[in-house]
Amino acid sequence: MKRFLNIFIFLFCVSPFLLAQTDLMFMQQTHNRSVLNPGATGKGGDVNMALSLRQQWIGFPGASTQMLNGSGFVKDIRSGFGFMFLNDELGPHKSQNLKINYAYFIPFAEKAFLSLGLGMGFIHNEYDESDFFAMDDNDDVITYERLTKTVPDFDFGMEFNTSNLEVGASVTHFSYAYEDVNLVRPMRNIYAYVRGKVPLDKYWDFIPGFTWHNTRQLNTYEVNASLRYNNNICVNIIYRNPASLGIAAGINIYGGFRIVYSYDYGFDGLSRYNNGSHEITLSYNIPVNTTYVRSKLRFFRWKMF
């Protein structure tokens, strides 16, 4: 009985991957927007580097993610350039994704701007059932098959910004169709999001947001709300359907160095088998084009989240 229980739990956990090769949704995805939308690459004018670590589903072995990304802005050609490397492991499924991103910024009457972005690179997926944990080594349900595939990978995105509003949409792995159901082939993912900034007083801002994510027949909605103090401290509460709640807190430590930590917990049928997920991001900003950006393009600057 325990053997079949382990199989059922595991397949339920990874069902989005088996059906659709869905992207991993970071709890801090608003802080690393260019990873899912190349149209946000270089926004803000600074040179930015970030390292994110996520430990998924504490209690299940082999469920961790590491991501490194960086970006910068070249004012002479109104363009952002960046890169992203993602290493993701979830049981028998492993994935590495390497991309370079480019975004072009179009100002509107010095009050808003539209950015269009393209991401290009490669993705390597591996499915190895020898990493599957089963209670019975002689279980004939597990075939111990190993599949690998490395293919070109492309993302496209756009984002519209004013001083108090951010609206964006993107498609990742857009060269692969919904019908391509394959354990090691990437699947097209679609995102749309909106955020607004409501100044409460001289120091405090209230920042609500909404994100929609679609992969094949899987739809995910996320509602988040944050309070930011003096651009240095931020607390964020996130709800994601069907039943996941997270909290994140970030602080600027010194100069352009900041740290963000988040914890999320699912209130679904799997909650009894795991202790939630931890995520931490370390990032550093080097001011380069701040004066130009503020005076010419009026970027919607998010120093936190």
Image: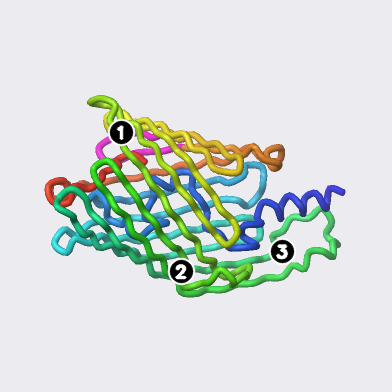
Residue 289 visible to the viewer = no
Q: Amino acid at mark 2?
A: Phe
Query: Residue at coordinates 33% horizontally, 59% vertically from top-left?
Result: 158
Count neighbours of disc 1 (C-alpha within 10 A) and say few if under 14, some if 14 to 19, many if 20 or more: some
Query: Residue at coordinates 51% horizontally, 72% vertically from top-left?
Result: 176
Instruction: Tell me residue 174's x, y (percent).
Output: 46, 69
Query: Residue at coordinates 71% horizontally, 55% vertically from top-left?
Result: 11
Front residue (pair 130, 294): 294
SS majority, magenta? strand
Labelled disc at residue 130: 3
Count neighbours of disc 2 (C-alpha within 10 A) and say few if under 14, some if 14 to 19, many if 20 or more: some
Instruction: Tell me residue 163's x, y (percent).
Output: 23, 43
Mark 3 or 1: in front is: 1
User: Which residue is denoted by mark 2 in the rendering?
Assistant: 174
Label 1: state its secondary structure: strand
* 179 left or right of 82 in image: right
User: Would you say residue 197 sits in the magenta stretch?
Assistant: no
Indicate whether 224 appears above or below 109: above
Highlighted magenta segment, given as a residue range: 250-261
* 104 left or right of 28 in image: left
What's the colour scheme? Answer: rainbow
Label 3: state its secondary structure: helix
Front residue (pair 41, 299): 299
Front residue (pair 159, 122): 159
User: Which residue is denoted by mark 1 in the rendering?
Assistant: 198
What is the spatial separation of the Cα atoms under label 1 and label 2, in whole angstroms?
Answer: 34 Å
What is the spatial separation of the Cα atoms under label 3 and label 1, in whole angstroms?
Answer: 51 Å
Residue 28: name its quadrant: top left
* 57 left or right of 4 in image: left
Count neighbours of disc 3 (C-alpha within 10 A) and say few if under 14, some if 14 to 19, many if 20 or more: some
Query: Residue at coordinates 16% horizontally, 58% vertically from top-left?
Result: 75
